[in-house]
Image: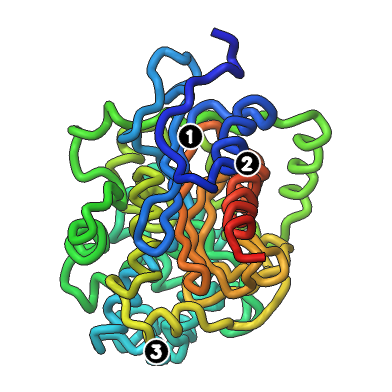
Amino acid sequence: MDATAVEVHGECAPGFEPVREAFEANFRERGELGAAFTAIRHGEVVVDLWGGWSGPDRAKPWRADTLANVWSTTKGMTAICAHKLADAGELDVDAPVAKYWPEFAAAGKAEVPVRWLLSHRSGVPGIGLDRPVRIEELYDWDLMTSLLAAQEPLCEPGSAGGYHALAYGWLVGEVVRRIAGQGVREFFAEQVAGPLGADFSIGLPGDADLDRCATLVDPVLTEEMANALATAFAAAGPVAQAALMNPRLQGHDANEPAWRHAVMPALNGHGTARAIATIYAALVDGSLLSPAALARARESQGKEVDAVLGLPNEWGLGFYLGSDARGFGPNPTAFGHDGLGGSTGGADPENGIAFGYTLNQLGPLIRDDPRKMALVNAVYESLSAQQPS
């Protein structure tokens, strides 16, 4: 079979044919290997597609239940855990982190509120370069949380956000653990994924699901892109280096069994597109958070240029807002979170839509991969065509 000729499985509701066309075009034109995309509107699944291959050897087809490591798409799931606690009155996002995690008060962080963790403004976007971190150490929860608790701020807390690429999961996850009395993996399973029947977990708790996992493939870079990336890393300041390069990760690192089993709530969520869409749909319909809690999660923390990524941002509390980039559709208050290489989960409550996207051929971007944007734009093209003229 030609590498670009794939069999696409699943269904599209009438009127959503542009999404199927975009999904197929991703394989023909944008280097897709294996992927799935699901969209849910007003509680009804309107798109549920999958196709391609689970690995680069093209020996095993992508199935409806293929799991993918979705990198930072996991951050949205971790944020939901915090908002569940806030919704229950157990977490005050404006209280100091140290109220729940006393050790975090070290090195001048006693007044840093939980809100600043959720919006990447804690001043601790990573571990300082004076303490190099090995990939294997990321799997040690107690070590990573103790290092972050002791870390002196690398930039002024509360100032313009600096993407907490790796640190976000341990920072927010430890607050969840201290309040809930259980790990964030278990809390998410019991309070979010389990009740919704969503096939998503923060790290895999056992070996049973390893055979369902897609093999991630590193981005294909042109010489120009590779040179630009090398230049950017060389020029990165200490804050960006701490956030992104201590340690520096590559897409294929997520294929290791030890990675899959660890609890890294910013990095190693494993799930299906259908599960991601199901969870975001539950935010839209109010079955997961109250209206007040969802409004708090979507509350803009201000537009900025991110101090780590150098990209324009507008954060809610744990979610990107659509803002000027319209990464989740034309509604600037649509929200969600992308993962390294292209995956996403997002929702637009005003239009009653939620979606999830998983893949294994990673792209070079942190967010708004062209394949993701083609699918999101096709969803809204479909919605627009259905509006009365």
Q: CA distance from mark 2 to mark 1?
A: 10 Å
Image x and y of residue 378, in percent:
62, 48
The location of residue 363, given as percent across then percent down, is: 62, 38
Residue sitting at the far right: 224
Task: Give how far apart the Cα atoms at labels 3 and 2 are.
Answer: 40 Å
- Residue 328 in view here: no
Q: Which residue is mark 3?
A: 96
Q: Secondary structure at mark 2?
A: helix
* The N terminus sits in image quarter: top right
Residue 358: mark: none
Q: Which residue is mark 2?
A: 371
What's the residue type where badge 2 is placed?
Answer: Arg
In front here: 172 or 231?
172
Q: Residue at x 69, y 28 (%)?
A: 29
Circles 2 and 1: CB distance less than 8 Å? yes
User: Which sits earlier in the primary sequence, circle 3 or circle 2?
Assistant: 3
* Labels 3, 2: front one: 2
In the rendering, at what x and y percent does residue 223 appear? 80, 29
In-front residue for pair 10/105: 10
The vertical placement of 256 against 272, above or below, is above
For label 1, the residue is 35
The quadrant where residue 85 appears:
bottom left
Q: Identify the amino acid type marked 3.
A: Pro
| First along the sequence among labels 2 and 1 | 1
Callout 2: 10 Å neighbours few (<14), some, many (20+)? many
* Image quarter in which the C terminus is found: bottom right
For label 1, the crowd category at 10 Å Cα-Cα, with few meaning under 14, some 14 to 19 and many 20 or more, is: many
Marks 3 and 1: CB-CB under 8 Å? no
Tell me the distance, in whole angstroms, between the alpha carbons under discs 3 and 1. Answer: 41 Å
| Image side of residue 150 versus residue 192, left or right | right
Whether 292 is drawn above or below 84: the answer is below
Question: Do the CB atoms of the residues marked 3 and 2 lie less than 8 Å apart?
Answer: no
